[in-house]
Amino acid sequence: MNLTEKAAYLKGLADGLELDGTTKEGKLIAALIDMVDALAAKVEELDCDVEELNDYCEELDEDLHDVEEVLLDDYDDECDGDCDECEFADDCELCEDTYEVECPACGEKVCFDESVDPTELACPACGEKLLEGEE
């Protein structure tokens, strides 16, 4: 039995007692039963809202999972910046128009494209500047 049914049952019990609605006690019991009925209706409304929100959250979770799969798969399939060893070098957009420089300090190979100023480029492994700027 849900709350709305229980509130209706209480109202039926009160009606069966034939309480006098003009006495203090009768007014109090009638007001309490009305309040229980209103509370039951509100709880039922909130339960419906919670169920709807749970369904929406599950949909969002599924959609986010799909997005993560696409992004992580794309990320895994991209060039890691090591153009000599890139398994996608033949058709990798990241390997097109890129330049490779070897760090003079540690020997790490670093790839960059024309949007990067090579004089500002630092080695990701050791932090040393890769090329000296013209003075």
Image (spheres, helix red, strand yellow):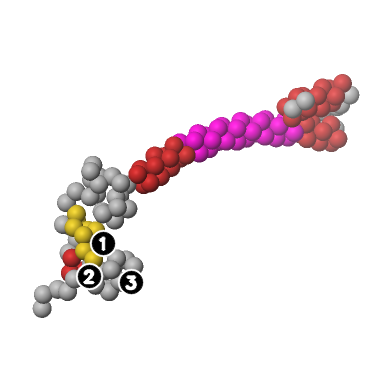
Along the viewing direction, whichever of 113 and 3 lies nearer the viewer:
113
**Label 3 close to label 1 by CB (< 8 Å):** no
- Residue 61: give x, y in percent of width and height: 50, 39
Pointer 2 residue? 130
**Which residue is drawn at the image coordinates 30% and 71% (left, top)?**
106
> Left or right of 14: which side holds 73?
left
Q: Secondary structure at mark 3?
A: loop
**Above/below status of 9 relative to 121:** above
By secondary structure, the bulk of the magenta-drawn segment is best described as helix
Q: Quadrant of residue 88?
A: top left
Give the residues in magenta: 35-63
Disc 1 residue type? Val
Which residue is tagged 1?
A: 110
Kindly check if marks 1 and 2 are in contact, taking CB atoms under 8 A apart as contact. Answer: yes
Q: Amino acid at mark 3?
A: Cys
Question: Quick one: SS at disc 1?
Answer: strand
Is 8 left or right of 84, judged from the image as shown? right
Q: How many marks?
A: 3
Side (left or right) of 43 relative to 95: right
Q: Which residue is mark 3?
A: 126
The relative height of residue 81 versus residue 77 in the rendered view (above or below) is: below
> Residue at point 77% right, 28% down?
7
User: Does the magenta portion include 49?
Assistant: yes
Residue 18 in the image: above or below residue 85: above
Look at the image and tell me in which quarter the C terminus lies.
bottom left
Q: CA distance from mark 3 to mark 2?
A: 10 Å
Lower position in the chain sequence, tag 1 or tag 2: 1
Residue 81 horizontal/vertical position (percent):
29, 55
